[in-house]
Image: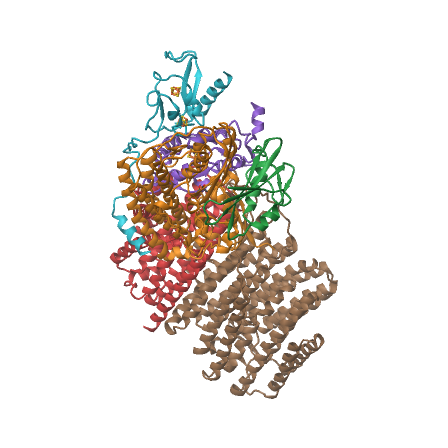
Amino acid sequence: MTTYTLLIAAPLFFALVVMVSGVVIRNIFAIAFVIGLSFLSISNIFVFHAPTETILPHFFHNLFILLDGMVLLFFLWQGVKTKNSLVKIFALFQIVLYVVVLLLSPTLISNDVLIDEISSVMYLIINIVGGIIIVYALKYIESEEFSRAKKNGFIAMLFFFLSVMNFIVSTNNIEIFFLLFELTTLCSYILIGYRGDEMSVLNAQKALWMNQIGGVAILVALIFSILQYKTVYFDVLIANIDAFYLLPIVFLAIAAFVKGASIPFDKWLLGAMIAPTPVSAILHSATMVKIAPYLMLKLAPAMSGFVSLTITLLGTFVFFAASLLALGKDYFKEILGYSTIALLGLMMALAAIGTPEAIVACLTLIVFHAISKALLFLQAGILEKSFHLKYVNDIDGLINNSPLVVFFIIVGFASLTIPPFGAFIAKFMAIETIASEIIKNPLYVFALIFLALGSAFLTLLYFKVVTKLFVKDVETKTVDIKISKFYTIPSYLLLILLVVGIYISFELELLSSLEIIVPLFLVAIVPLLFALILFKKADRVKEYNCGEKDDIQLNMYYFHMPSVIKKDIAIIAVVGMCILILGVLL
Amino acid sequence: MIEILLILFAPIIGGFIYGFERVVRARMQNRQGPPLLQPFYDMFKLIDKQAFIVNPYHTILGIMHFITLWVVVAFIIMGQNLLYVIFLHLLSSIFLILAGFSVKSIYSHIGSNRELLAALAYEPILIMIAVGFFMVNGSFDIAVIREHDASIASLFLLFLAYLMVMPIKLKKSPFDATEAHQEIVGGVEIEFSGIFFEFLYMAKWLEYIFVYLLLMLFAGDNIFLGIGLFIGVFLLLNLIDNATARIKMKHLIKIVLSLGLTLGMCNLIGLAYV
Amino acid sequence: MKKIKVSLESVREEIESFYDYKKWHFLTLNGLALADNRMEVQWIFSKYEALDEVVVYYAEIEYTDIIPSIADMIPSAIISQREIVDMFGVKVDGSEKGLYLDEDSIQRPLSGCAI
Amino acid sequence: MFDLKKYRKKSPWILHYNAGSCNGCDIEILASLAPKYDLERFGVINTGNPKQSDIFLVTGPVTYRSRERLVELYTQMPEPKVVIAVGSCTCTGGVFRDMYNVEDGIDRYIPVDVYIAGCAVSPELIIDGVVKALEILEKKSKEMEKALKLFKEATSENGVINRRNVALKVGEVHEEN
Amino acid sequence: MKKTINIPLGSQHISLLEPVRFKFECENEKIISVDSDVGFVHRGIERACTTKFKFDAIGYVVARVCGLCAITHSLSYTAAVEKLLGGEITKKAKYLRILLLELDRIHSHMLCLSHTCENAGFEAMFMRIMGDRELVMEIQELLTGNRVQFDYINIGGVNRDINSEVAKKIIENLYEVKQRVLGYMDEFTNNWSLSLKFKGIGALSLDDAYSFNAIGPLARASGLNIDVRNEIDYLPFNEIGFKMQTQFEGDINARNIVRLNEIFNSILMCENIVNGLPEGEIFTKLKGKPNGEAIVRFEAPRGELMYYVKGNGSAMLERVRIKTPTFACIPAFTHIFVGENYADAPAILASFDPCLSCTAK
Amino acid sequence: MLTSLIKAFTNLFKKPQTIDYPVTPIIKDREYRGLIEYGEESCIYCLKCEKACPPGAILFVKTETPSENEKNKKGLQYHYNPYLCIYCSECVRACPKPDEALWQSNKKPLPATKEGKVNESWFELEKLKKTE
Ligand code: NFV
Ligand code: SF4
Ligand code: SF4
Ligand code: SF4
C-alpha cells in the first residue's frame, strides 16, 4: 500500500469510527488519527523520490461514475426540495454535460493518479493543518447545542473532507477530479448548512450553486479537451497543448476561480462564515479553496502569453479588489474571508506566471497562508466562544484580558504581512517576478500596481483588527480569562509550524539569511521585551486629553465601501473573464 | 570599515541634517533660528528628563521603531536588496503605528490612523521605484545600483514621484498631515516623554538619512550628482515647506496615489519599451 | 433706544409679531437686579443698517418666575438664555445651568442675593 | 564630567495654558515666538504637549473652571520643570483680584518659579522671564515637586500618580486655615 | 455598534490661544455633532463693575476683559458713561479714539489671519504675518506706551497726545503694512494648498447668517451687511472714509478676504486721521455721576460689541452688561462645524477669530 | 504660492528680522509705561493714589518708623506691588503732585522668583491694612 492510498482511505475509515463513539473515546481516537495522518504526510515527503503513477482498475472508474451520478442527482434533489432554481438549473446542466462527457470516450489513456512535489506539499497542508483544526473542532463542537450524533457527524464530515482533499491533489484524471470537485462542493454544502437555521441553509445553497458553476466549467473543459486532444488526463493535456487552442485550460482556470472564490464568485466563501468556525478554518486554510491555486499550478506549464497575462492580471486584480472590499467590513471572520480571497487571487496570479520562481512563491504562499489563516480562524473561534466577540470594533483592549489570544492574533497577522514570514516572502518574490516580467511585457505594470496597492490595503486591513487589541489605559487592570487547552494547544502547534516554515524557507534560501534573521530577531524581541521589562518603576501619568478628564471613545477609521464600487469590481472581474474566454476563442 | 562607521553615526548625521534644516527653515521665515546643534541639545535634555510611561507596550514599540529604522539604514548602507529594504521600512512604520494604537489617547490614535493611510499612499510608489531600479540596473541590490550609472534620467518620472513621497516621510508641508501639530499635537508621538521620546526624536533623524539615501540612489555611482541632488532637493523641500499649507489626508492620498502611480506607470511602461 | 414693557406671558407673541429676521437682529438678553427680590429682563434688538435703532422689550419678574424661551424663533438666543440662568438663578424654558459657573463657585452672582 | 544638566538650559520646550487671562499676555507669548523676538533661538519649541515640555507658561488668574485642568497639565509634565506666571493677573490676580470666580494668581495651585509682571507683559519681559527660568531649571532636581498648601496629598497607587481632584475647594481652604 | 470617535479640541490645545472646549463627535474625521463649553475664562467682571470699582476706574477694568479688543471695550464703556453724563468731547479726541480703534483692528485681524494660517499648517505665513504685525505694534506702543493694553481712553477724552514724530512714524509704518498686506492678498487668493484648506470650508450661508444673527466678519463674509460703524454716530466714521466690506461665499477664504479688505480700509482711515487731525484739546473734564441707562454699540474687530450701563447717580454703577461679538456667535460656530472635517476644525475655529475671554467675561 | 517660494528664498539670504535681545538689551521707548515710582519727599499723603488704583497695588500702611515727612501725620509707609499693578497710570493722574510724588517711569519690572515671596509679603500688608 502506498502512502497516498492510506491518506485517502484512512480518513474515510476514521470518519466511520468517529461517528459511533462517545465524547472521550471519540476525542482520543480523533487525536490519534490526526497524529497518524500527519506522520503519514510527513513520511510521504521523505519517501518521495520520483512521481508516483498509478492506473486505477476499471472497477473504480465505474464506481466513480456511479458516485458522480448520485452526487449530481442529490444536488438536483436538493434544488427541487428547497425550490432553489439556480441550484436546479446548474445541477441539470451538469447532468446533461456529464452525460455528453460520458458519451464521448477519450482515446489517449494515462495515469489516474500522479503524485508530484506539489501534491506532497499539499498533503502536508491538508493533513497537518487540517488535522490541527479537527483537534480544535473537538472542543468547539461540544460548546454547540446539537445532538450527540450530529456532533460526531460533524467531526466525521471533517475527516471525510480530508480524504476527498487528499484524493483531489493526487488525481490526474479530470473526470475523477470532477467527481472530487463535486464532493468538496457537497461537503461544504453540508458543513455550511450544518446549523440548519435559515441563514445557514440560504448560504449553503449559495455555496452550492456557485460551486456548481465550477463544475460546469470543468465539464466544458472536459468536452473541449476530449474533442481536441482526445484525453481526460492533465498530464497528457498539458504535454500536447497547442498554444492556439487553450480553451480547456481556460475553463479549468475558471473552475479554479470559482473554487478560489475570486470576485465575482466571492459570495459563497463569505456566506460560509455562518457555519461553525472550524468549518471556516478548514475551508480557508487547508481544504476547498486551496484547490484553486493547486489547479492553477497544475495548469501552469500549459499557459503562455495571453492566457498567462490575463490570469495574472485577473488574479492580482482580485488581490487588490478583495482587500479593498475587506476594508469596509467589521465582522472579524469576514475580514479574514476577504483576505483569503485576496491572497488566493495572488496565488493564482503567481501560478499563472509560471516561472520557477513564481511557482516557489506560490507554494510558499499556499503553505504559509494555510498556517496563518488556520491560526487566525482558531482565534476567531476563541473570541466567539470565550469572549463572545464577533466584531472588530468590540475587541477593545483584549490584551488586558487575554494576552495569549492577542499574541496569536498578532502573530497571525504579522505572518501575513511582515518579513520574514512566508506570506511576505511570497509577496516579495511576486514583485520580483513581476518586475522581471514587465521587461518582457509592459502590461504587467498593472499587475504590479494591483499588487502594490493590494498589499498596502491588506496591511491597512490587518491593522483594523490589531489596532483594537492593544489599547491599554494607565488605569485598567489586567484580568486574565482562562481559555481551554483544546483551544490553545492547536494554536501553539500552528505557531510551531510557522517557525518550522521559517526554518525551511531559511534552508531553501528563499531569502538571504541576513534578510530572514534580522527581522525575525526584531519581531521576536518585542514579545520578549514585553515579558521581561514591565517598567514597574517608571512613573505613569494619564494620557494627554487636552487637560480634560472625561472618557475617551476610540475607534479605528472605518471605510465605507459604496455598493457602486462592489458592483464595478464585479463587473470588471466578469469582463476580465469574458476577455479571457473571448481572447482564447479568437 | 567605513560602512560600519557610517552605520554607527547615521543618527548623528541625521541630527545634523535636521539641525541644519531647522536653521534654514528659520532663515526662510525671516528668523534667526536655533543653533545648528540644537537637536543634540534636545537629545541630551530628553535623556536627562523624567520619563513617564503610559503602558509598557507603547514604550517598547516606540523603541522598536527606532531600532528597526536603524537596521533599515544599515541595510541600505550595506547595499542589500532595495525591495527588501522598503518592506523592512514598512515594518518600522508598523511598530510606530502599533505604538500609537496601543494607548488610549485620542490624538495618538488619530495620528496612527493617518500614519497608516500615509503608508498606504507611499508604499506602492516606493515599490514602483524599486521595480524601476530593477529594470534599469537588472538587480534589486543597492550595491549593484550604486555601481551603475546615474539612473535619474531614465527614472525621471519616478524621481518626481519620489519627490512627493519625501515630504510625507519627513513630515513637511504640504504632506505633513500625519504629524499635524495644530490638529493632533504631533499624533503618534504625543504620549512619549523623556528618554522614550528621545528614541522617537532620533528616529526622525534616521528617517532623514533613509529618505536622502534613497534619493542618492538615483545618482548611481556619480557622487557629485548625488551631493548635488541632495542639496537641490533639500532646498526644494524646504522652500515648498515654506510656501504651502498642510493639506488634508484625503487630498494627500488622492494626489500622491493618483499622480505617483501614473508617473510610475508611465515610467515603467516607457522603460519596458525602450 | 425704545423701551417697551411686556408681560412674561405675552413676550413670545410680541416678539414673534415684531421680529423679522432679515430686518432686525437680536442683540442679547439682559438681566437687571431690582430692589425687593425682583429683576428686570430685557430682550434687546437692533435694526440692520439703521442709525442706532435699538428696541428693548422688558419685563419685571420675580426670581421664581419661568421665562419663556425664544430659542425656536431666534436660535442665537440660546446662549444668552443660558447666561441669564447662570447669572441670576432664574429659570428659562429649556436652558440648563452651567455655562460659566461650577458647582462650587458663587451661584447667581448678579442677582441681589448671591450665594 | 559630561554633565547632562547643562543641556536643560539649551532646549526648553514650552507649554502654554491660559487659565483665564484676558488674552493680552497670550498674544504676547505668540509674538515672542514670532520673528522679531524668536524664542526658538534659545531652543524653545512650543510643543503644546505637557509630556514633552519643560516650561509651563501660565497666564491668567485661575478661574474655577481652569483649576483642575491646570493641575492636570502640571502633573503631566515630567520633572524637572519650571512654571512661569506670565502677567500681573497670573502673579497676584491683577485687576481680577477678589473677583468671585477667580483665585488670586496661580501660585495657589502650583508652585511658581518665575513671576513676570506687566499688563500686558511685553515680549522682552517674557524673554527675561524665560532666561531666568532657565537658570532655575538648571539647578532643579528631578524630585517630584512638593504639593502646595492647596493640594491634598497626591495619591499614588501602584506607580500611578493621581493628582486629580486634589485641588481643594475654596470653602475647604478657609476651614483649614 | 458605535463607530464614532470623540475628538476633544481644548481646553488646552496647541491650536488654541484660549481655553475653550469643543468636543467633536466624528465619523472617521467628519464631524457630526459638536458640544461646546465656553465658560473657562469667566472671571466675573460684570459683577465686579458694580461692586468693586468706581465708575471712573471701570474703563481700565473692562479693558481687561480682553487684550485683543481692549480698546473697544474701554471705548464702549466710556461712551456709555459719557452718554449718561452728557457733554461732548472734542473732535480731536474722537479722531484719536478712532485711530487707535482702527490700529487695534488691524493688529487683531493680522493676528487672526496668521493664526488661521498656522492652524492650517502654514507656518511660514504665520511667521510672515506675525513679523509684519510688529510694525503695527510698534506704532501702538509709541502712541500709548504699551503694546497690548493701551489704557488710552478716559472719560472725557484720551490720555495721551500725538506728536508729529509719532504721526510720521505711523504714516511710514502703515504704508509698509499696506504693501505687505497686498502680498497676503495674493497669497490667500492664489496659493494652491491654501485654497484646498480654505475654499468652501466652514461655509455659512446668508440665510443662516441672518437666522443665527451672525455679526462681524463672519456675517460680512456671507454677504450680510452689518457693521456697527455704519449704524452709529458718536464717532465720525463716515467722515474719514469708512466702507463696508462684504464677500458672499461665507467660507474661510471669504472671511480672510473680508479681513484683508478691512485692514486696507482701516489703514486708509488711519492715514486720513493722521493727515487731517484737527487741533484742540484731547481731554474735557466731565462732571457729575452717571444716572440712567444707556446702550452703546461699537464695532470690535470681531463684530458688534454692546454695553449696557445703568447708573443711579452714585459712584457705583447699578449694572454693566457686556455683550460681546463672540458670545453672540457661538451658536453659529457650532452650526458651522457640523459636516466639516476634523482636520479643518482648528483652521475653521481660528477663522471665526473667537475670543473666549470676551465671551465669558 | 510662487511669491511665497520667492519670499522664502530671498529671506534665506537676508538678515533676519530677529532682534538680539537680551544679549544687546533694547532701551525701551521714553514713553513706555513702566514701573510706578514714588518720591517720598513731595508726597502729601492724601492717599488719592491708593483709592484710585483699580487693583489696589498701592498701599499706605502704618509703620513704627515712618519717614520724616511732616505731611505724614498718621505714620504711613508707601508700598507698591509691581506684580499687582496693571500699569494703567490712573494713580499718577489722581495724584495732586504728579511727577514729583508719583510718576510712571519707563523701567521694566523685573521677573521675580519664588524667593521673592511676591504674594506672601503682600498678603501680610493687606492684612495689616485691614486690621487698622
Ligand atoms: N469677542 C470679542 Fe472681543 C473683539 N473683537 C470684543 O468685544 O475680542 Ni477679545
Ligand atoms: S496681565 Fe493683564 S494683559 Fe496679561 S492677561 Fe492679565 S489682564 Fe491680560
Ligand atoms: S498704574 Fe494703575 S495699577 Fe499701577 S499703581 Fe497706578 S493705578 Fe495702580
Ligand atoms: S496721590 Fe500723590 S501725593 Fe497723594 S498720597 Fe499718593 S503719591 Fe502722595
Q: Quadrant of ligand 3?
A: top left
Looking at the rendered image, the quarter that the N terminus of chain A falls into is: bottom right
Expressed as whole percent of the image width and height from the top left, the position of residue A159 reads 65, 67
Expressed as whole percent of the image width and height from the top left, the position of residue E236 reads 38, 42
Q: Which residue is painted at 63% across and 62% down in the image?
A: A278
Decide if residue B59 is on the left or right side of residue B81.
right
Decide if residue C4 is on the left or right side of residue B241.
right
Would residue E144 be seen by someone viewing this image from the given angle? yes
Expressed as whole percent of the image width and height from the top left, the position of residue A70 reads 68, 79
Q: Which residue is painted at 46% across and 61% down in the image?
A: A456
Decide if residue E302 is on the left or right side of residue A477.
left
Is A321 above or below relative to A236? above
Q: Which residue is painted at 34% across and 62% down in the image?
A: B160
The chain letter corresponding to brown is A
| Numbered label tally | 0
Chain B is shown in which shade? Answer: red
Chain C is shown in which shade? Answer: green
C59 or C114: nearer the viewer: C59
Is A504 above or below relative to A60? above
Is E289 above or below relative to A360? above
F91 or E34: nearer the viewer: F91
A529 or E35: nearer the viewer: E35
The chain letter corresponding to purple is D
Would residue D83 be seen by someone viewing this image from the given angle? no
Residue E275 position by quadrant: top left
Color theme of the render: by chain
Chain E is shown in which shade? Answer: orange
A306 or E224: nearer the viewer: E224
Chain F is shown in which shade? Answer: cyan
Residue A221 position by quadrant: bottom right
Expressed as whole percent of the image width and height from the top left, the position of residue E7 reads 52, 49
Residue E164 position by quadrant: top left
